[in-house]
Amino acid sequence: MPHPALTDLHTAVERVRTGTYIPLGGPHAYDSDRAAASRNAAVLALFTPAADRARVPGADLFLVQRSPALRHHPGQIALPGGRIEPTDVGPEAAAVRETEEETGIPAGQVAVLGALPQVLVPVSGFVVTPVLGWADRATPATTVTDGEVLHTLRLPVADLLDPAARATVVLAGHGSCGFRIATGWVWGFTGNLLDHLFTELGWTLPWDRAREHAMSWDEARGAQLLD
C-alpha cells in the first residue's frame, strides 16, 4: 500500500495538472511581466517516510541551514535548491542537482513527483519552480563541499505542523509564516511556501497567526550560529 503522504503528494501534482491547485499568492504571486525580468531557480521539497508513521502525515522533510558566513541569505533555513543552469534539463533536474550538491543525497534516491506553479521571490529577483520529490530512503552526506550549507536538517513534518511551533515572523515590519525548529525559524519565502503547500496537502493544523515572533536582523543573518 502506498504511503499516505506519498498519495497526498501525487494528488497535489494531479491538481496542478488539472488547474485546481491554488497557487501561492501574496508577495510571491506569479506575474509574467515580473517573471520575465527575474532569474530562474528551482527548489526541492523532498519527503521521506518518518520513523514514527503514527504521527500524521508520517513523513519527514529535508531542509538545509545555510552558512552564516555567506554573503546572501546567511544562516537561513530553506529548501535545497538554486539557480537553473543552461545544462539542466528543466527545473526538476535543477532541483535534484542542487539538492545533491547541498545535502549529498544522491539523485538516484530521489523520485521526482512533479512541479508546483511558479512563484516569485522579489527580494532576490528569482522566479522559483517548487518541485515535489519522494525518497523511500535518503542518506544525506555528513559533510558537503560547496561551502553554502552549514548542515542538512531532516525534520518530522508533524513537528513543523505543531501549532505551538507556529507564529508569524516579523522582520522590519514585514510578516511571514514561521515554523520554529531547534536551530532557528523557518520564515520568509520558505515559510510562506511550506505553509501554503501543507494547506494544499490538507495537512495544516489551525495555528494562531496573531502570535508574532519579532526577529532581529542579527537573528535573520544567523549570528547565533557563530557562537
Image (cartoon, helix red, strand yellow):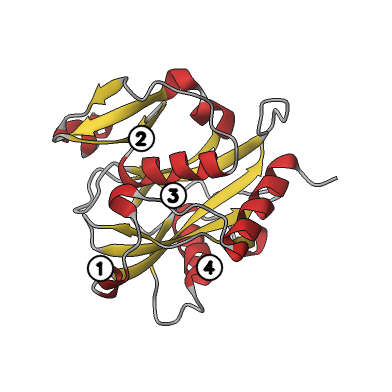
Q: Answer with mark 3 or mark 4, whichever residue precedes in sequence.
A: 3
Q: Which mark is residue 74?
A: none
What type is the residue that disc 4 sits on?
Glu
What type is the residue that disc 1 sits on?
Arg
The quadrant of the rendering that contains the C terminus is top left
Q: x%, y% of residue 206?
A: 49, 24
Q: Secondary structure at mark 2?
A: strand
How far apart marks 3 and 1 lie (CA) works out to: 23 Å
Residue assigned mark 3? 79
Residue assigned mark 2? 177
Please name which of the two marks, 4 or 2, marks the residue nearer to the observer. 2
Q: x%, y% of residue 209?
A: 36, 25
Q: x%, y% of residue 217?
A: 15, 35
Q: x%, y% of residue 168?
A: 31, 29
Q: Answer with mark 4 or mark 2, whichever residue precedes in sequence.
A: 4
Q: Answer with mark 1 or mark 4, whichever residue precedes in sequence.
A: 1
How far apart marks 3 and 2 lie (CA) works out to: 15 Å
Please name which of the two marks, 2 or 1, marks the residue nearer to the observer. 1
Q: Which mark is residue 34?
A: 1
Mark 1 nearby-residue class (10 Å; few <14, some 14–19, many ≥20): few
Q: Secondary structure at mark 4?
A: helix
Name, please, the residue furthest toward the bottom. Answer: 86
